[in-house]
Amino acid sequence: MQEMILILDFGSQYTQLIARRVRELNVYCEIYPFSDFPKITESVKGIILSGSPFSIRGDDAPNPDLTNIKGKLPLLGVCYGAQFLAHNYGGSVEASNTREYGRANLSFVDGESQLFKDIPLGSQVWMSHADTITQLPHNSKVVASTNDVTNAGYEIEGESTYAIQFHPEVYHSSDGLQLVKNYVVGICGCIQDWTPDSFVDTTVAALKEKLGNDKVVLGLSGGVDSTVAGVLLHKAIGANLYCIFVDNGLLRKNEFESVLEQYKHLGLNVKGVNSKSRFYDELKGESDPETKRKIIGRVFIEVFDDESHLIEDVSWLAQGTIYPDIIESISVKGPSATIKSHHNVGGLPDYMKLKIVEPLSSLFKDEVRRVGAAMGLDQSLLGRHPFPGPGLAIRILGDITVEKVQILQEVDFIFIQGLKDAGLYDNVWQAGSILLPVQSVGVMGDERTYENAVALRAVESTDGMTADWCHLPYEFLAKVSNDIINKVKGINRVVYDISSKPPATIEWE
Protein backbone atom coordinates (compact mmCIF):
# COMPACT_ATOMS: atom_id res chain seq x y z
CA MET A 1 0.00 0.00 0.00
CA GLN A 2 1.26 3.48 -0.93
CA GLU A 3 2.68 5.32 2.08
CA MET A 4 1.36 8.83 2.58
CA ILE A 5 1.22 11.99 4.65
CA LEU A 6 -2.23 13.32 5.54
CA ILE A 7 -2.88 17.04 5.83
CA LEU A 8 -5.70 18.15 8.11
CA ASP A 9 -7.03 21.33 6.49
CA PHE A 10 -8.28 24.19 8.64
CA GLY A 11 -8.97 26.40 5.62
CA SER A 12 -5.60 28.06 5.00
CA GLN A 13 -4.82 29.47 1.57
CA TYR A 14 -1.42 27.76 1.95
CA THR A 15 -2.68 24.22 2.56
CA GLN A 16 -2.21 23.19 -1.08
CA LEU A 17 1.35 24.50 -0.95
CA ILE A 18 2.10 22.14 1.93
CA ALA A 19 0.93 19.25 -0.25
CA ARG A 20 3.11 20.47 -3.08
CA ARG A 21 6.18 20.57 -0.85
CA VAL A 22 5.57 17.02 0.36
CA ARG A 23 5.10 15.76 -3.19
CA GLU A 24 8.30 17.48 -4.32
CA LEU A 25 9.99 14.97 -2.04
CA ASN A 26 8.39 12.07 -3.96
CA VAL A 27 6.06 11.34 -1.07
CA TYR A 28 2.33 11.02 -1.65
CA CYS A 29 -0.02 13.13 0.45
CA GLU A 30 -3.71 13.96 0.64
CA ILE A 31 -5.67 16.90 2.03
CA TYR A 32 -8.79 16.37 4.13
CA PRO A 33 -11.03 18.96 5.79
CA PHE A 34 -10.77 18.95 9.59
CA SER A 35 -14.49 18.15 9.69
CA ASP A 36 -14.15 14.97 7.63
CA PHE A 37 -10.87 13.31 8.51
CA PRO A 38 -10.45 9.77 7.14
CA LYS A 39 -9.78 6.56 8.99
CA ILE A 40 -6.09 6.25 9.80
CA THR A 41 -4.54 3.20 8.11
CA GLU A 42 -1.06 1.68 8.25
CA SER A 43 -0.14 3.58 5.09
CA VAL A 44 -0.36 6.93 6.93
CA LYS A 45 3.14 7.83 8.12
CA GLY A 46 2.44 11.28 9.54
CA ILE A 47 -0.11 14.08 9.82
CA ILE A 48 0.25 17.82 9.25
CA LEU A 49 -2.13 20.36 10.78
CA SER A 50 -2.52 23.35 8.45
CA GLY A 51 -2.90 27.05 9.08
CA SER A 52 -6.28 28.76 9.19
CA PRO A 53 -7.93 32.17 8.78
CA PHE A 54 -9.58 31.54 12.17
CA SER A 55 -8.29 32.41 15.62
CA ILE A 56 -7.97 29.51 18.04
CA ARG A 57 -9.45 31.85 20.63
CA GLY A 58 -12.66 32.37 18.64
CA ASP A 59 -15.96 30.65 19.42
CA ASP A 60 -16.08 29.28 15.87
CA ALA A 61 -12.50 27.98 15.85
CA PRO A 62 -12.01 24.54 14.24
CA ASN A 63 -11.48 22.10 17.09
CA PRO A 64 -11.24 18.45 15.99
CA ASP A 65 -10.57 15.58 18.37
CA LEU A 66 -6.97 14.31 17.94
CA THR A 67 -7.20 11.57 20.55
CA ASN A 68 -6.45 8.84 18.01
CA ILE A 69 -3.60 10.77 16.42
CA LYS A 70 -1.53 12.78 18.88
CA GLY A 71 1.22 10.73 20.48
CA LYS A 72 0.48 7.77 18.22
CA LEU A 73 1.74 9.16 14.90
CA PRO A 74 4.23 11.87 13.97
CA LEU A 75 2.38 15.18 14.05
CA LEU A 76 3.40 18.61 12.72
CA GLY A 77 1.35 21.72 13.50
CA VAL A 78 1.87 24.69 11.15
CA CYS A 79 0.81 28.18 12.33
CA TYR A 80 -2.82 27.60 13.42
CA GLY A 81 -1.90 23.94 13.88
CA ALA A 82 0.84 24.95 16.34
CA GLN A 83 -1.56 27.23 18.19
CA PHE A 84 -4.20 24.50 18.25
CA LEU A 85 -1.77 22.11 19.95
CA ALA A 86 -0.75 24.73 22.48
CA HIS A 87 -4.33 25.77 23.25
CA ASN A 88 -5.63 22.23 23.71
CA TYR A 89 -2.72 20.60 25.53
CA GLY A 90 -1.83 22.85 28.43
CA GLY A 91 -0.38 25.95 26.73
CA SER A 92 -1.76 29.43 26.07
CA VAL A 93 -2.42 31.45 22.94
CA GLU A 94 -3.06 35.18 23.15
CA ALA A 95 -3.55 38.04 20.76
CA SER A 96 -0.23 39.46 19.64
CA ASN A 97 0.46 43.14 20.35
CA THR A 98 1.36 43.49 16.68
CA ARG A 99 0.36 41.31 13.73
CA GLU A 100 3.25 38.94 13.04
CA TYR A 101 3.28 38.92 9.26
CA GLY A 102 6.06 38.71 6.70
CA ARG A 103 9.74 37.83 6.73
CA ALA A 104 11.63 37.02 9.91
CA ASN A 105 14.91 35.30 10.74
CA LEU A 106 15.61 32.49 13.19
CA SER A 107 17.60 33.88 16.13
CA PHE A 108 17.73 30.51 17.92
CA VAL A 109 17.80 26.98 16.54
CA ASP A 110 18.10 23.84 18.67
CA GLY A 111 20.79 21.84 16.89
CA GLU A 112 19.56 18.62 18.51
CA SER A 113 16.04 18.92 17.11
CA GLN A 114 15.26 16.50 14.26
CA LEU A 115 12.85 19.01 12.79
CA PHE A 116 15.54 21.70 12.44
CA LYS A 117 18.38 19.49 11.23
CA ASP A 118 20.63 21.35 8.73
CA ILE A 119 18.68 24.59 9.14
CA PRO A 120 21.13 27.40 9.96
CA LEU A 121 20.84 30.22 12.43
CA GLY A 122 19.47 33.28 10.65
CA SER A 123 17.39 31.27 8.20
CA GLN A 124 14.53 33.34 6.78
CA VAL A 125 10.97 32.23 7.62
CA TRP A 126 7.54 33.58 6.73
CA MET A 127 5.12 34.56 9.51
CA SER A 128 1.38 35.04 9.04
CA HIS A 129 -0.62 35.22 12.28
CA ALA A 130 -2.30 37.67 14.63
CA ASP A 131 -2.21 35.36 17.69
CA THR A 132 0.94 34.10 19.35
CA ILE A 133 1.83 31.21 21.68
CA THR A 134 2.66 32.65 25.10
CA GLN A 135 2.92 29.34 26.96
CA LEU A 136 3.93 25.98 25.56
CA PRO A 137 1.86 22.82 26.06
CA HIS A 138 2.85 20.32 28.75
CA ASN A 139 6.24 18.61 28.39
CA SER A 140 7.30 20.92 25.54
CA LYS A 141 10.53 22.73 24.76
CA VAL A 142 11.42 25.57 22.41
CA VAL A 143 13.45 24.49 19.38
CA ALA A 144 13.36 27.71 17.33
CA SER A 145 12.85 31.43 17.93
CA THR A 146 12.93 34.73 16.07
CA ASN A 147 13.67 38.11 17.59
CA ASP A 148 9.94 38.77 17.97
CA VAL A 149 8.54 35.27 18.44
CA THR A 150 10.12 33.23 21.23
CA ASN A 151 8.03 30.12 20.58
CA ALA A 152 8.50 30.00 16.81
CA GLY A 153 9.07 26.25 17.00
CA TYR A 154 8.57 23.67 19.72
CA GLU A 155 8.31 19.94 20.23
CA ILE A 156 6.57 17.80 22.82
CA GLU A 157 9.05 15.50 24.53
CA GLY A 158 8.27 11.80 24.71
CA GLU A 159 6.32 11.83 21.42
CA SER A 160 6.86 12.83 17.78
CA THR A 161 4.80 16.00 17.99
CA TYR A 162 6.26 19.19 16.51
CA ALA A 163 4.92 22.67 15.91
CA ILE A 164 6.02 25.85 14.14
CA GLN A 165 4.45 29.32 14.03
CA PHE A 166 5.76 30.06 10.53
CA HIS A 167 5.00 28.69 7.06
CA PRO A 168 7.76 26.45 5.63
CA GLU A 169 5.67 25.75 2.52
CA VAL A 170 5.98 29.25 1.00
CA TYR A 171 9.06 30.16 -1.00
CA HIS A 172 9.84 33.08 1.37
CA SER A 173 10.96 30.48 3.94
CA SER A 174 14.44 29.86 2.57
CA ASP A 175 14.92 26.45 4.22
CA GLY A 176 11.26 25.46 4.18
CA LEU A 177 11.71 22.42 1.95
CA GLN A 178 14.53 21.19 4.20
CA LEU A 179 12.25 21.44 7.23
CA VAL A 180 9.46 19.57 5.43
CA LYS A 181 12.01 16.91 4.42
CA ASN A 182 13.22 16.65 8.02
CA TYR A 183 9.65 15.91 9.08
CA VAL A 184 8.48 13.73 6.18
CA VAL A 185 11.66 11.72 5.63
CA GLY A 186 13.62 12.04 8.87
CA ILE A 187 10.81 11.86 11.43
CA CYS A 188 8.02 10.04 9.56
CA GLY A 189 10.45 7.69 7.77
CA CYS A 190 8.91 7.99 4.28
CA ILE A 191 11.02 6.29 1.60
CA GLN A 192 10.37 8.76 -1.26
CA ASP A 193 9.25 6.29 -3.90
CA TRP A 194 6.22 8.12 -5.31
CA THR A 195 7.45 9.00 -8.83
CA PRO A 196 5.66 9.45 -12.20
CA ASP A 197 6.77 5.97 -13.26
CA SER A 198 5.55 4.40 -10.04
CA PHE A 199 2.26 6.28 -10.36
CA VAL A 200 1.74 4.85 -13.86
CA ASP A 201 2.50 1.31 -12.69
CA THR A 202 0.31 1.41 -9.59
CA THR A 203 -2.54 3.26 -11.33
CA VAL A 204 -2.65 0.91 -14.31
CA ALA A 205 -2.62 -2.09 -11.95
CA ALA A 206 -5.40 -0.56 -9.85
CA LEU A 207 -7.47 0.23 -12.95
CA LYS A 208 -7.10 -3.35 -14.23
CA GLU A 209 -8.32 -4.68 -10.89
CA LYS A 210 -11.14 -2.16 -10.59
CA LEU A 211 -12.46 -2.31 -14.14
CA GLY A 212 -11.75 -5.90 -15.13
CA ASN A 213 -13.41 -6.56 -18.50
CA ASP A 214 -15.88 -3.70 -18.12
CA LYS A 215 -16.33 -1.14 -20.87
CA VAL A 216 -15.52 2.51 -20.12
CA VAL A 217 -16.59 5.68 -21.91
CA LEU A 218 -14.31 8.71 -21.56
CA GLY A 219 -15.06 12.27 -22.43
CA LEU A 220 -11.99 13.76 -24.10
CA SER A 221 -11.49 17.53 -24.20
CA GLY A 222 -8.25 17.83 -26.13
CA GLY A 223 -6.47 19.00 -22.98
CA VAL A 224 -3.67 17.41 -21.01
CA ASP A 225 -5.82 15.97 -18.22
CA SER A 226 -8.31 13.96 -20.24
CA THR A 227 -5.61 12.85 -22.69
CA VAL A 228 -3.34 11.48 -19.97
CA ALA A 229 -6.37 9.85 -18.34
CA GLY A 230 -7.22 8.26 -21.70
CA VAL A 231 -3.72 6.85 -22.21
CA LEU A 232 -3.66 5.44 -18.66
CA LEU A 233 -7.02 3.76 -19.19
CA HIS A 234 -5.96 2.45 -22.59
CA LYS A 235 -2.90 0.86 -20.95
CA ALA A 236 -5.21 -0.84 -18.46
CA ILE A 237 -8.18 -1.98 -20.56
CA GLY A 238 -7.20 -1.48 -24.22
CA ALA A 239 -10.13 -1.80 -26.65
CA ASN A 240 -12.68 -1.63 -23.83
CA LEU A 241 -12.09 2.13 -23.68
CA TYR A 242 -14.45 4.22 -25.83
CA CYS A 243 -13.57 7.91 -26.13
CA ILE A 244 -15.99 10.68 -27.02
CA PHE A 245 -14.95 14.18 -27.98
CA VAL A 246 -17.88 16.58 -27.87
CA ASP A 247 -18.05 19.80 -29.81
CA ASN A 248 -20.10 21.93 -27.45
CA GLY A 249 -19.77 25.01 -29.62
CA LEU A 250 -17.55 26.58 -26.97
CA LEU A 251 -14.17 25.30 -28.13
CA ARG A 252 -11.35 27.34 -29.61
CA LYS A 253 -11.27 28.05 -33.32
CA ASN A 254 -10.83 24.84 -35.40
CA GLU A 255 -10.13 22.88 -32.21
CA PHE A 256 -12.66 20.10 -32.86
CA GLU A 257 -11.04 19.07 -36.14
CA SER A 258 -7.43 19.49 -35.04
CA VAL A 259 -7.86 17.54 -31.79
CA LEU A 260 -9.55 14.62 -33.57
CA GLU A 261 -6.60 14.49 -35.96
CA GLN A 262 -4.17 14.55 -33.04
CA TYR A 263 -5.88 11.66 -31.27
CA LYS A 264 -5.53 9.44 -34.33
CA HIS A 265 -1.83 9.11 -33.53
CA LEU A 266 -2.38 7.96 -29.92
CA GLY A 267 -4.16 4.73 -30.75
CA LEU A 268 -7.30 5.81 -28.89
CA ASN A 269 -10.75 4.87 -30.15
CA VAL A 270 -12.31 8.35 -30.47
CA LYS A 271 -15.72 9.40 -31.75
CA GLY A 272 -16.41 13.08 -32.48
CA VAL A 273 -19.90 14.32 -31.60
CA ASN A 274 -21.25 17.67 -32.85
CA SER A 275 -23.61 18.96 -30.13
CA LYS A 276 -23.28 22.71 -30.69
CA SER A 277 -26.96 23.47 -31.09
CA ARG A 278 -27.87 21.44 -28.01
CA PHE A 279 -25.57 23.48 -25.78
CA TYR A 280 -26.54 26.81 -27.36
CA ASP A 281 -30.24 26.06 -26.86
CA GLU A 282 -29.78 25.20 -23.20
CA LEU A 283 -27.59 28.25 -22.50
CA LYS A 284 -29.84 30.74 -24.29
CA GLY A 285 -30.49 33.83 -22.20
CA GLU A 286 -28.50 32.61 -19.17
CA SER A 287 -25.97 35.07 -17.70
CA ASP A 288 -25.20 33.72 -14.22
CA PRO A 289 -21.72 32.09 -14.28
CA GLU A 290 -22.48 29.30 -11.83
CA THR A 291 -25.71 28.45 -13.63
CA LYS A 292 -23.85 28.36 -16.96
CA ARG A 293 -21.32 25.91 -15.49
CA LYS A 294 -24.12 23.68 -14.18
CA ILE A 295 -26.01 23.75 -17.48
CA ILE A 296 -22.88 22.75 -19.39
CA GLY A 297 -22.13 20.01 -16.87
CA ARG A 298 -25.66 18.68 -17.14
CA VAL A 299 -25.72 18.72 -20.95
CA PHE A 300 -22.31 16.99 -21.06
CA ILE A 301 -23.75 14.24 -18.91
CA GLU A 302 -26.83 14.01 -21.14
CA VAL A 303 -24.68 13.76 -24.28
CA PHE A 304 -22.53 11.06 -22.70
CA ASP A 305 -25.64 9.25 -21.59
CA ASP A 306 -26.98 9.28 -25.13
CA GLU A 307 -23.66 8.16 -26.60
CA SER A 308 -23.08 5.51 -23.96
CA HIS A 309 -26.39 3.87 -24.88
CA LEU A 310 -24.92 3.31 -28.33
CA ILE A 311 -22.13 1.23 -26.75
CA GLU A 312 -23.28 -2.19 -25.67
CA ASP A 313 -22.82 -2.97 -21.94
CA VAL A 314 -20.77 0.11 -20.99
CA SER A 315 -20.38 0.33 -17.20
CA TRP A 316 -18.13 3.31 -16.41
CA LEU A 317 -17.78 7.00 -17.19
CA ALA A 318 -14.14 8.12 -17.00
CA GLN A 319 -13.20 11.74 -16.27
CA GLY A 320 -9.96 13.71 -16.30
CA THR A 321 -10.68 15.30 -12.92
CA ILE A 322 -7.53 16.52 -11.13
CA TYR A 323 -6.89 17.43 -7.51
CA PRO A 324 -7.36 21.24 -7.77
CA ASP A 325 -10.82 20.62 -9.30
CA ILE A 326 -11.79 18.67 -6.20
CA ILE A 327 -10.20 21.11 -3.75
CA GLU A 328 -11.98 24.09 -5.36
CA SER A 329 -15.34 22.31 -5.53
CA ILE A 330 -15.59 20.86 -2.02
CA SER A 331 -16.05 23.28 0.82
CA VAL A 332 -14.28 22.79 4.13
CA LYS A 333 -17.00 23.31 6.73
CA GLY A 334 -16.43 26.73 8.18
CA PRO A 335 -12.99 27.95 7.03
CA SER A 336 -13.41 27.86 3.30
CA ALA A 337 -16.12 28.24 0.77
CA THR A 338 -16.66 26.74 -2.64
CA ILE A 339 -14.92 28.91 -5.24
CA LYS A 340 -16.65 27.40 -8.23
CA SER A 341 -18.25 24.17 -9.29
CA HIS A 342 -16.55 21.99 -11.89
CA HIS A 343 -18.57 20.17 -14.51
CA ASN A 344 -16.55 17.00 -14.00
CA VAL A 345 -16.68 16.85 -10.19
CA GLY A 346 -19.42 15.09 -8.31
CA GLY A 347 -21.89 12.28 -8.78
CA LEU A 348 -24.07 11.31 -11.71
CA PRO A 349 -27.84 11.77 -11.94
CA ASP A 350 -29.97 8.82 -10.90
CA TYR A 351 -31.06 8.06 -14.44
CA MET A 352 -27.50 7.47 -15.57
CA LYS A 353 -26.37 4.08 -14.40
CA LEU A 354 -22.65 4.51 -15.09
CA LYS A 355 -20.06 4.41 -12.34
CA ILE A 356 -17.31 7.04 -12.29
CA VAL A 357 -13.57 6.40 -12.60
CA GLU A 358 -11.09 9.27 -12.20
CA PRO A 359 -7.48 8.06 -12.56
CA LEU A 360 -5.95 11.55 -12.09
CA SER A 361 -8.02 12.82 -9.16
CA SER A 362 -5.02 12.76 -6.80
CA LEU A 363 -2.67 14.80 -9.04
CA PHE A 364 -1.87 18.47 -9.53
CA LYS A 365 -1.53 19.78 -13.10
CA ASP A 366 2.27 19.68 -13.26
CA GLU A 367 2.18 16.12 -11.91
CA VAL A 368 -0.21 15.14 -14.70
CA ARG A 369 2.30 16.47 -17.23
CA ARG A 370 5.12 14.48 -15.64
CA VAL A 371 3.00 11.32 -15.74
CA GLY A 372 2.23 11.99 -19.42
CA ALA A 373 5.95 12.43 -20.14
CA ALA A 374 6.69 9.15 -18.34
CA MET A 375 4.28 7.46 -20.78
CA GLY A 376 5.99 9.04 -23.79
CA LEU A 377 3.35 11.59 -24.79
CA ASP A 378 4.53 14.32 -27.17
CA GLN A 379 5.58 17.60 -25.59
CA SER A 380 3.34 19.58 -27.96
CA LEU A 381 0.39 17.89 -26.32
CA LEU A 382 1.72 18.01 -22.76
CA GLY A 383 2.66 21.67 -23.12
CA ARG A 384 -0.85 22.80 -24.08
CA HIS A 385 -2.27 25.48 -21.87
CA PRO A 386 -5.13 24.41 -19.60
CA PHE A 387 -8.55 25.14 -21.04
CA PRO A 388 -11.65 25.22 -18.82
CA GLY A 389 -14.20 22.43 -19.12
CA PRO A 390 -17.05 24.88 -19.77
CA GLY A 391 -14.92 26.39 -22.52
CA LEU A 392 -15.58 29.88 -23.83
CA ALA A 393 -18.90 30.03 -21.96
CA ILE A 394 -17.08 31.26 -18.87
CA ARG A 395 -14.93 33.64 -20.89
CA ILE A 396 -18.04 35.35 -22.24
CA LEU A 397 -19.41 37.45 -19.43
CA GLY A 398 -23.17 37.46 -19.72
CA ASP A 399 -25.39 35.37 -21.97
CA ILE A 400 -24.08 33.12 -24.74
CA THR A 401 -24.83 33.66 -28.44
CA VAL A 402 -23.30 32.18 -31.55
CA GLU A 403 -22.09 35.63 -32.59
CA LYS A 404 -20.30 36.21 -29.27
CA VAL A 405 -18.63 32.79 -29.47
CA GLN A 406 -17.39 33.48 -33.00
CA ILE A 407 -15.98 36.87 -31.97
CA LEU A 408 -14.15 35.38 -28.99
CA GLN A 409 -12.82 32.47 -31.04
CA GLU A 410 -11.20 34.91 -33.44
CA VAL A 411 -9.75 37.03 -30.62
CA ASP A 412 -8.44 33.95 -28.81
CA PHE A 413 -6.86 32.58 -31.99
CA ILE A 414 -4.96 35.82 -32.61
CA PHE A 415 -3.76 35.95 -28.99
CA ILE A 416 -2.64 32.31 -28.71
CA GLN A 417 -1.05 32.23 -32.17
CA GLY A 418 0.67 35.50 -31.36
CA LEU A 419 2.19 33.97 -28.22
CA LYS A 420 3.47 31.03 -30.27
CA ASP A 421 4.88 33.22 -33.05
CA ALA A 422 6.69 35.41 -30.48
CA GLY A 423 8.17 32.39 -28.67
CA LEU A 424 6.22 33.26 -25.52
CA TYR A 425 3.71 30.40 -25.41
CA ASP A 426 5.86 28.04 -23.33
CA ASN A 427 6.64 30.84 -20.86
CA VAL A 428 2.95 31.18 -20.04
CA TRP A 429 1.05 28.65 -17.90
CA GLN A 430 -2.38 29.63 -19.19
CA ALA A 431 -3.65 32.32 -21.54
CA GLY A 432 -7.08 33.25 -22.76
CA SER A 433 -9.37 36.04 -23.87
CA ILE A 434 -12.51 37.31 -22.18
CA LEU A 435 -15.40 39.02 -23.96
CA LEU A 436 -16.73 41.73 -21.69
CA PRO A 437 -20.37 42.87 -21.52
CA VAL A 438 -19.10 46.39 -22.06
CA GLN A 439 -19.25 48.61 -25.10
CA SER A 440 -17.10 51.68 -25.44
CA VAL A 441 -16.57 54.52 -27.87
CA GLY A 442 -13.83 54.21 -30.45
CA VAL A 443 -12.72 55.88 -33.64
CA MET A 444 -11.95 53.95 -36.83
CA GLY A 445 -11.01 56.16 -39.72
CA ASP A 446 -13.24 59.17 -39.39
CA GLU A 447 -16.11 57.21 -37.94
CA ARG A 448 -17.26 56.86 -34.35
CA THR A 449 -17.70 53.25 -33.18
CA TYR A 450 -19.50 51.80 -30.20
CA GLU A 451 -18.27 48.23 -29.89
CA ASN A 452 -17.15 45.53 -27.47
CA ALA A 453 -14.09 45.34 -25.25
CA VAL A 454 -12.02 42.19 -24.67
CA ALA A 455 -9.59 41.40 -21.88
CA LEU A 456 -6.46 39.34 -22.41
CA ARG A 457 -5.29 37.11 -19.54
CA ALA A 458 -1.92 35.36 -19.22
CA VAL A 459 -0.63 33.87 -15.98
CA GLU A 460 2.34 32.04 -14.54
CA SER A 461 1.61 29.11 -12.21
CA THR A 462 2.65 25.62 -11.22
CA ASP A 463 -0.64 23.92 -10.49
CA GLY A 464 -3.35 26.54 -10.83
CA MET A 465 -3.92 26.92 -7.12
CA THR A 466 -2.04 30.24 -7.15
CA ALA A 467 -1.02 32.32 -10.15
CA ASP A 468 0.66 35.59 -11.04
CA TRP A 469 0.10 37.66 -14.17
CA CYS A 470 2.71 37.41 -16.90
CA HIS A 471 4.82 40.46 -17.67
CA LEU A 472 4.43 40.16 -21.44
CA PRO A 473 6.45 42.65 -23.51
CA TYR A 474 4.66 45.90 -24.29
CA GLU A 475 5.61 45.52 -27.94
CA PHE A 476 3.89 42.13 -28.08
CA LEU A 477 0.74 43.41 -26.36
CA ALA A 478 0.65 46.39 -28.72
CA LYS A 479 0.85 44.15 -31.80
CA VAL A 480 -1.77 41.70 -30.54
CA SER A 481 -4.12 44.52 -29.58
CA ASN A 482 -3.73 46.10 -33.00
CA ASP A 483 -4.29 42.76 -34.77
CA ILE A 484 -7.45 42.04 -32.77
CA ILE A 485 -9.00 45.46 -33.35
CA ASN A 486 -8.17 45.42 -37.07
CA LYS A 487 -9.16 41.82 -37.77
CA VAL A 488 -12.10 41.08 -35.47
CA LYS A 489 -15.28 42.92 -36.34
CA GLY A 490 -17.10 44.14 -33.25
CA ILE A 491 -14.03 44.84 -31.07
CA ASN A 492 -12.59 48.31 -30.60
CA ARG A 493 -10.83 48.03 -27.25
CA VAL A 494 -8.34 45.53 -25.73
CA VAL A 495 -7.26 45.51 -22.07
CA TYR A 496 -4.74 43.32 -20.23
CA ASP A 497 -5.57 41.69 -16.88
CA ILE A 498 -2.78 42.23 -14.31
CA SER A 499 -4.49 40.66 -11.29
CA SER A 500 -3.07 37.63 -9.49
CA LYS A 501 -4.69 34.54 -7.91
CA PRO A 502 -5.59 35.09 -5.14
CA PRO A 503 -7.56 37.32 -4.94
CA ALA A 504 -8.69 36.95 -8.56
CA THR A 505 -9.27 33.58 -10.20
CA ILE A 506 -7.54 32.66 -13.45
CA GLU A 507 -10.84 32.53 -15.30
CA TRP A 508 -13.21 35.47 -14.94
CA GLU A 509 -16.20 33.25 -14.17
Image (cartoon, grey):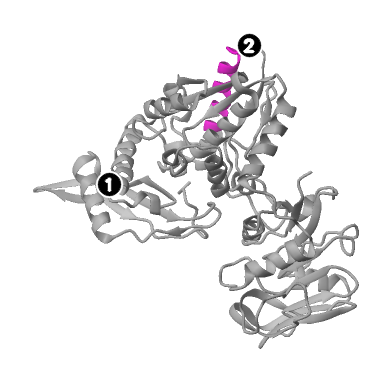
For disc 2, the marked residue is: 312
Q: Amino acid at mark 1?
A: Asp
Residue 185 located left or right of residue 422: right
- Considering depth in this image, is 300 or 400 the residue closer to the camera? 300
- Considering depth in this image, is 91 or 233 the residue closer to the camera? 233
Residue 43 located left or right of residue 258: right
Q: Quadrant of residue 166?
A: bottom right
Residue 27 horizontal/vertical position (percent): 69, 54
Residue 54: tell me if it is visible. no
Position above or below: 11 against 148: above
Numbered marks: total: 2
Q: CA distance from mark 1 to mark 2?
A: 46 Å
Mark 1 in CB contact with mark 2 (< 8 angstroms): no
Residue 464: tell me if it is visible. yes
Residue at 84 percent across and 48 percent down: it is 39
Residue 289 located left or right of residue 319: left
Q: Which mark is residue 160?
A: none
What segment is highlighted magenta in the picture?
A: 295-311
| Crowd class of label 1 (few under 14; some 14 to 19; many from 20; radius 10 Å) | few
